[in-house]
Image: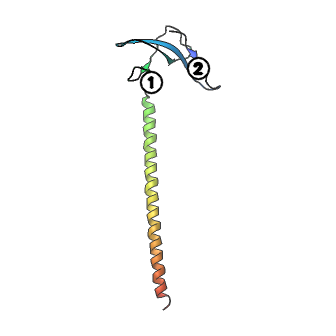
């Protein structure tokens, strides 16, 4: 409905552009200000993503983004599990060693005077 306007974000950052947009669907004609490519002219077609309520939203995640997120999450879960298992193992060893040393001290106290 109008030329895209650059966002006035922080200096040195790429913030994109927005423009008023009109679309039709079964419910009727809708308008909203949506993100578009910088420099887009009035009357140009653009793809707009809508949420379940028909409001403009960001596009869905790309396959690459989903893959990277899945791999990162899996690696973090594996690392977290190994830290928990390793910490539990170390704690159990310390507890058993402490008990063994206490028992050894008691037994040594009984044997040494002889």
Residue found at the very far right of the displayed protein: 11
Label 1: state its secondary structure: loop
Q: Which residue is farthest left? A: 26
Which residue in the structure is indicated by mark 2? 7
Q: Position of residue 87 (x, y in %)?
A: 46, 58
Packing grade of label 1 (10 A; few <14, some 14-19, many >=20) is few
Q: CA distance from mark 2 to mark 1?
A: 19 Å
Q: Determine which residue is flagged by label 1.
A: 59
Relative to 81, say whether 44 is above or below.
above
User: Which label's residue is closer to the chain start, 2 or 1?
Assistant: 2
Circle nearer the viewer, 2 or 1: 2
Q: Does residue 76 sit above or below 3 in this rendering?
A: below
Q: Quadrant of residue 74?
A: top left
Q: Identify the residue at image location x=56%, y=21%.
A: 16
Coloration mode = rainbow
Task: Name the residue located 45 percent from the left edge and 66 percent from the top edge.
Answer: 93
Q: Could you say where residue 21 lies in the image, as x and y percent from the top left?
A: 48, 13
Choose between 63 and 15: the one closer to the eye.
15
Position of residue 53 relative to residue 101, above or below, is above
Q: Quadrant of residue 107?
A: bottom left
Residue 51 % position (x, y):
40, 23
> Residue 30 placed where, x, y %?
42, 13
């Amino acid at each position: 409905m109008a030329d895209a306007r650059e966002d006035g974000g922080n200096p040195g950052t790429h913030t994109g552009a927005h423009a008023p947009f009109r679309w039709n669907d079964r419910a009727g004609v809708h308008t909203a200000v949506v993100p578009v490519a910088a420099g887009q002219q009035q009357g140009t077609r653009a793809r707009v993503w809508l949420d379940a309520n028909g409001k403009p939203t960001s596009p869905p995640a790309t396959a690459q983004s989903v893959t990277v997120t899945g791999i990162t999450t899996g690696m973090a879960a594996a690392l977290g599990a190994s830290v928990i298992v390793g910490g539990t193992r170390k704690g159990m060893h310390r507890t058993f060693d402490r008990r063994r040393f206490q028992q050894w001290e008691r037994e040594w106290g009984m044997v040494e005077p002889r």
